Image (cartoon, rainbow, N blue to C red):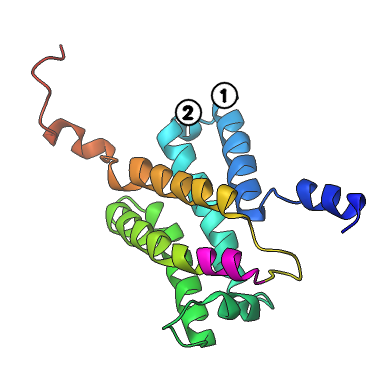
């Protein structure tokens, strides 16, 4: 491998899903600072950024990438494109559900379970060097923290979030004034 190839691979370590997540968060938070009241909360920004990322990744399950995703499926799962379609649909549904207060918590729980369940496919791809778009898979040293970041943000902004109208029903901490 030439030095140029190695340099190019290092530059490509930024994963598209992380890029979408970070750019969405920056753009939405900036909008909040510029006066969009709904986007002043980090809870809302985290939830919306997660939704944007999940809409992006979920829709990729219906693109030419679906064949790469099938190759990533670990044993004993069958190499069946329907699994990829199903996970894409659930990512998209979860992304939308997180934005609807009534479905937020259930969507968050489902997404956390799905992200945890899908992690072995990412490990399988990294260990077996299964390419994605003809390029090496995301290294585990990057993929594992990314997956934990997505799970943590969804946990804090969707599962652990309490809708505005429900805040008064929460048990109050007797130590807080």
Q: Position of residue 130 (x, y in %)?
A: 65, 72
| Foreground pick, 124 / 57 | 124
Q: Position of residue 175 (x, y in %)?
A: 11, 14
Which residue corresponds to the image point at 76% horizontal and 51% vertical from the top-left? 12
Does the segment drawn in magenta span residue 128? yes
Q: Position of residue 103 (x, y in %)?
A: 30, 57
Q: Is residue 52 above or below residue 69?
A: above
Q: Is residue 175 left or right of residue 98?
A: left
Which residue corresponds to the image point at 46% horizontal and 34% vertical from the top-left? 38
| Quadrant of the frame with the N terminus | bottom right
Proximity of marks 2 and 1: CB atoms separated by less than 8 Å: yes
Does the segment drawn in magenta span residue 4? no
Which residue corresponds to the image point at 48% horizontal and 52% vertical from the top-left? 147
The image quadrant that residue 110 belongs to is: bottom left
| Foreground pick, 158 / 78 | 78
The image quadrant that residue 171 belongs to is: top left
Looking at the image, tell me whether mark 2 or mark 1 is earlier in sequence order.
1
| Quadrant of the frame with the C terminus | top left
Disc assigned to residue 163: none
Q: Which residue is mark 2?
A: 40
Q: Which residue is mark 1?
A: 33
Q: Is residue 45 above or below residue 138?
A: above
Q: Secondary structure at mark 1?
A: helix
Q: Position of residue 75 (x, y in %)?
A: 45, 81
């Amino acid at each position: 491998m030439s030095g140029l190839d190695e340099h190019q691979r290092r530059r490509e370590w930024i994963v598209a899903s992380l890029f979408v997540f970070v750019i969405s968060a920056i753009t939405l938070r900036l909008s909040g600072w510029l006066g969009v009241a709904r986007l002043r909360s980090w809870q809302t920004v985290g939830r919306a950024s997660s939704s944007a990322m999940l809409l992006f990744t979920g829709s990729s399950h219906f693109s030419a990438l679906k064949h790469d995703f099938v190759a990533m499926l670990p044993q004993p799962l069958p190499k069946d494109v329907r699994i990829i379609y199903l996970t894409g649909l659930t990512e998209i549904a979860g992304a939308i559900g997180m934005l609807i207060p009534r479905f937020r918590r259930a969507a968050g729980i489902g997404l956390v379970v799905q992200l945890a369940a899908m992690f072995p496919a990412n490990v399988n791809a990294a260990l077996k060097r299964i390419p994605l778009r003809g390029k090496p898979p995301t290294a585990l040293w990057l993929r594992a923290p990314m997956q934990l970041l997505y799970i943590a943000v969804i946990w804090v902004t969707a599962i652990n979030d309490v809708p505005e109208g429900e805040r008064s029903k929460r048990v109050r901490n007797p130590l807080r004034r």
